[in-house]
Image (spheres, rainbow, N blue to C red):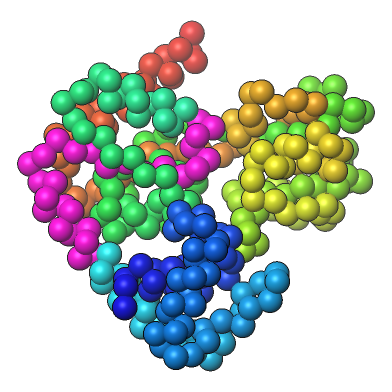
Amino acid sequence: MEIRLLQEFVSLVETKSFQETSEQMNISQSTLTKHIHKLEDEMGVSLFDRSTRSVELNEYSKTYYPYAEKIVKLYEEGDAMIAALLSQGKNVLRVALTPALAHYSGIEVLSDFSREFSQYRLEITECPRVIDLLTDQKCDFVFAMENDAMDGHMSKLLYKIDRLVVVFPASHPLAALKEVTLEQLRDERFIFHRNSSGEMHLETRKFLQLCKDASFKPTAAANISSISTIVKMVSQEQGIAILHQGQIPADAEDIFWTELIPTVHSHIYALYLNNKPMSAACRAFRSYLLQRIDRREEAASV
């Protein structure tokens, strides 16, 4: 049995979504379907109850999942240890970032570092679950938004601060305002940012908590995982959206964003393990980030 099949099985159990698992595993949904069928053929049982809209676990998948998860975890831990041994003494820097970091100049920062410190080889991974990569020692640094999974084993550098804004279609009467309050949004329909399994992204969680504190229950028009799709739906007057200001594409047309009052900030961090010896490449990257952060703070204070 191929370990890849087990990795895909574990992911599908956790997401209950062929779309989300195919994105995580970087394969097409048709390939994922073939792999799951292959696993089922090898085991001689059907592992999922499928419909056109969802994936439901059955008694076989529920029973097999904890064993498959252990196998996958042990394999990945062993793989990570071998990778760590191979990289010892080499000038390799492994960095992982979430897809959202594309909106925050993450690639540009890494490219600038690579040009300035050409003696180090940079390995970049894009993954929605970067915290897992860090804790499994599959990378040296990760860039991520605020995350409940951060713990005392991680050190963090504040990379950027963003804020929640309200995105309106250009025709909306509130679009011309510099700021809007929750009270002004009570009758609106919202396009929320959630992943395909229904988990809320950070900005959605923060906005819903704000609404709850204000005894305000927002009306959901849609739950969408893609920022570009959300922006397009807003431009087509299908609702309004709450996003981080840095997530909004610079070339987006037929929309305007407005500051939300009260102001709600979010933080983007560069994280690394504080109980792991740092290589020369890691120390250079940490110093490089600290210098960029210091220059940014000096520019902001002028």
Q: Quadrant of residue 103?
A: top right
Task: Give the answer, above or below, for where 7 lies relative to 38.
Answer: above
Vertical arrangement, residue 139 with respect to residue 245, above or below: below
- Count of numbered tags: 0
Identify the image quadrant of residue 170.
top right
- Would residue 210 be found to the left or right of residue 35 on screen? right
Q: Residue at x 39, y 71 (%)?
A: 5
Query: Which residue is at the far left?
Result: 89
Q: Main secondary structure of the magenta part?
A: helix
User: Compared to 132, does 226 lie above or below?
Assistant: above
Q: Nearer the viewer, residue 36 or 273?
A: 36
Q: Could one spot residue 145 in this view of the protein?
A: yes
> On the rendered image, what quadrant is the N terminus found in?
bottom left
Residue at 86 percent across and 47 percent down: it is: 189
Q: Is residue 269 left or right of residue 100?
A: left
Magenta run includes residue 199: no
How far from the left and from the top, in percent, is residue 39?
Answer: 42, 79
Q: Is residue 199 visible?
A: no
- Left or right of 205 on screen, residue 64: left
Q: Residue at x 44, y 77 (%)?
A: 38
The reply, left or right, for residue 286 in relation to residue 61 is left
Q: Residue at x 35, y 67 (%)?
A: 4
User: Could you say where residue 110 lies in the image, as x and y percent from the top left?
Assistant: 35, 29
Name the foreground residue: 255 vs 26: 26
Q: Position of residue 118 (x, y in %)?
A: 20, 23
Q: Nearer the viewer, residue 219 or 252?
A: 252
Instruction: State the extent of the magenta-drawn residues as a range.
Output: 77-104
Q: Residue furthest top?
A: 302
